[in-house]
Amino acid sequence: MMSANHKQANGTTTLGVLPHGKTARVVAVGGAGAVARRLMEMGVVPGAPVCVVKTAPLGDPIQIRVRGYDLALRYTEAQTISVCAE
Amino acid sequence: MNPAPALPAEPTAPRERARTLTVALAGNPNAGKTSLFNALTGLRQKVANYPGVTVERKEGVWPLPAADSPWPARLVDLPGLYSLDAASIDEEIARDVILGRMTAVVPAPDVVVAVVDATNLERNLYLVTQILETGRPLVVALTMIDLATKRGIEIDAAQLGQSLGVPVVPVVATQRRGLDALAAAVLQAACAEGRCGVGWRLSEAAERELLALAGENGNGRGTDKSVEATDADGARRQAALVELYADELPPNEARQQAVVAARARLEAANPQWWQEPLVARYDWIERAARASVRRKREERSSVTDRIDAVVTHRVFGPLILLAVMIVVFQTIFSWAQLPMDLIDQGFGALGDAVRLHMPAGLLTDLLVDGVIAGVGGVLVFLPQILLLFFFIALLEDSGYMARAAFLMDRLMRGVGLHGKAFMPLLSSFACAIPGIMATRTIENPKDRLATILIAPFMSCSARLPVYTLMIAAFFTGRKVFGVVSVGVLIIMAMYGLGIAVAVAVAWVLKRTLLKSPPPPLVLELPPYRLPSAVNIAHTMRSRSWMFVRRAGTVILAISILLWALATFPRLPKAAAQDAQANARAADDGRQASGAAGANDSAPQADDKGAQIRQSFAGRLGRLIEPAIRPLGFDWQMGIGLISSFAARETLVSTLSIVYNVGDADAQDGSNSLIEAVRNARRPDGSRAWTPLVAVSMMVFFVLACQCMSTIAIVRRETNSWRWPLFMVTYMLVLAYVASFITYQGGRLLGFS
């Protein structure tokens, strides 16, 4: 599921497929509605550095670090967030 | 002025107050708000609910120890929230209190104290910017500074205050440091002039729309630059901002059109137009933080990371969760047993004492069998509730609860439930009541309701006496493959049946009545912290008190009703015998009621048996016999079923009355009751109970909602009779169908 076809132009990828431990910057939050808003309220806004800490034992959700704290979100939501690896 | 929905408090002129100051305590979850509240108010606090919802309303008296303080303050502890754009009921209430929309319950706060966690500054400041925008006087209480220092983060509070434009007071609640300074800052803010505000701006296009909306709203005194006019401009801009970016439209039709048109123009230019204020706030926060925060070093591996490496580990994580579950479960089961027995015996003794000292008659019966038994039936749950909330508070405060949700989310989502539904459901194996009360952490009302509706399928401890009696009567001594006892297998099957049906029902509910997309998961994994004993004690106290007060009244009423059903109409002969027996007992100079009770039990039990057969409950039992015959039950079991709707374990005591076994011998299905059950005959001489009937009965008890306390608490938590009635009905239907299939299917397969 973590294949290369998620890779987009100029080093942009999505948060769901970002390798663990690698820091990237949020480029855009693509989703709409309450979940997207909540993610942004929690600090996942364009320009913020994020990194994926780990994946839950059953493969979902994932744990990310943003603004110095840890947040759990599901793979589906993570895929709506484009990031640019640094 | 047009009353927009979120119009901030009108800027009042110098605040001369002769009344109590109202201070609201707001902050993110895990920011240390509760500790600060407890430190400021001590025990001078009370907990209630906001009207119409199950959100806890915590208030206390803050004496404001500053020397020049003329008044104590009324301190309102708001539910934890991340943002004023509410995502849950908790957040909605908190927002409404801050905006002064709950004046019927809480006066509009004179000052808001925002609790900000220094180790998580930027995200905590998001809420601060939003409160600033409302224009309410604000003071920031900066917590966890010691932890921040340990993590190499140095915060210049004065500089931060300057950047934000409001006082920032560092506090350490546990050591009571900074509390006086906080009080002084609050007093000063309460008396300060001018409106708070923020300096961030949106894109030109968006600002133009805001200006247009604000202009339409006010009367456009653009040139007047007095303080009042600037304040009024700020308030109008804020009102326009809320209208433009809120989910709902303003009530006024003309305004609606203006807002819709503005949104369309913005959306045409930028599809993500709604993100602008969020990005602007964080930009502003980053600037404020940059000026006042110095990171000495980047800590590579914090304690939390090291704990997480084990606790959410691929292999150890689930094992640790299992261990935690076993400990919680075992404790609630076994430790609660002793106090529960004591409460039970205490009320039994109280009943005996009342019987001894009051003249025999209806009033005494009502008092003993209705009121005292009812109150005892409520209080007997207290040990389990206290223990469960001890664990929940412990797991929540330490930060483990979020990890449990993180681990279990994938599984729970499969059923359409939230990871946070896991703990309440687990708790329901001990008792559904605390389990249902623990669903409050689930934000989405539909997800919460689905969890509440399936919680009673978890086999609670009250079903055990029924299982035990059935197995003792029909399945003792039998083994499969010579090692595993059939009884254990059957009990496990009953637990499994409850879980399987719960999963199926949740699946169906989430696709029909409670149709909603799978609940999103955006869950903070807070740093692990040592839980505070004071906070845990507060949680246990308030939760158990709420249970006693709210559920207690309903339970008491139902208990009296059931007593009446079993008592009326009176058996004239029995009444006379009762009186005789009592007179005789008095003559005998009965002293130790326990011993005497055992001696008298046989003739009295006979009377009781005749009475209950004659009563409404007995008649109902006969009335429903045709309906329950296909399940393998006769009318005597029907009486048991009816009375067990008070509480499941009542089946055992009712059967012992129906079969004329003495009360004292009936405890825990003693031998005489087991014999009576084995030997009970139908009118045609065949055995009333067979192994198949016993299994059918157990299946019925797994699935039916026979517990008035559960009904009462669901009524309390959902705030209507609709859901508890729905729950009782659908569970009854399921129980009936399943028992029917069990009994008839079993007969077809040749079992008896």
Image (cartoon, rainbow, N blue to C red):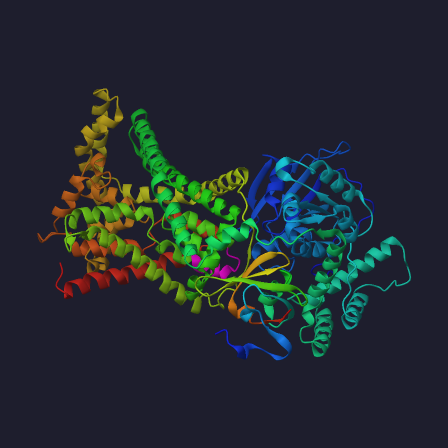
Residue that appears at 75% across and 34% down: B69
Q: Position of residue B31 (x, y in %)?
A: 61, 48
Q: Residue at x 89, y 55 (%)?
A: B226
Instruction: Give yes or no for residue B244 being in the magenta stretch.
Output: no
Residue, far left: B685
Q: Is residue B505 visible?
A: yes
- Closer-to-camera residue (B529/B379): B529
- Of residues B681 and B565, the one nearer the viewer is B681
Q: Position of residue B91 (x, y in %)?
A: 60, 55
**Snapshot quadrant of residue B615:** top left
Main secondary structure found in the magenta portion: helix
Task: Left or right? Give the position of B145 relative to B700.
Answer: right
For this view, does B171 lie left or right of residue B220? Answer: left
- Quadrant of the image containing the C terminus of chain B: bottom left
Quadrant the N terminus of chain B occupies: bottom right
Determine whether B491 is above or below B201 in the image.
above
Q: Please tell me which residue is depicted at 52% across the width and 46% down the height of the picture.
A: B398
Q: Position of residue B653 (x, y in %)?
A: 25, 41
**Residue at 77% across / 40% down in the picture?**
B17
Query: What x and y, as percent, mark residue B212?
Result: 80, 70
**Figure disc tally:** 0
Foreground pick, B21 / B523: B523
Q: Which residues are magenta?
A: B442-452
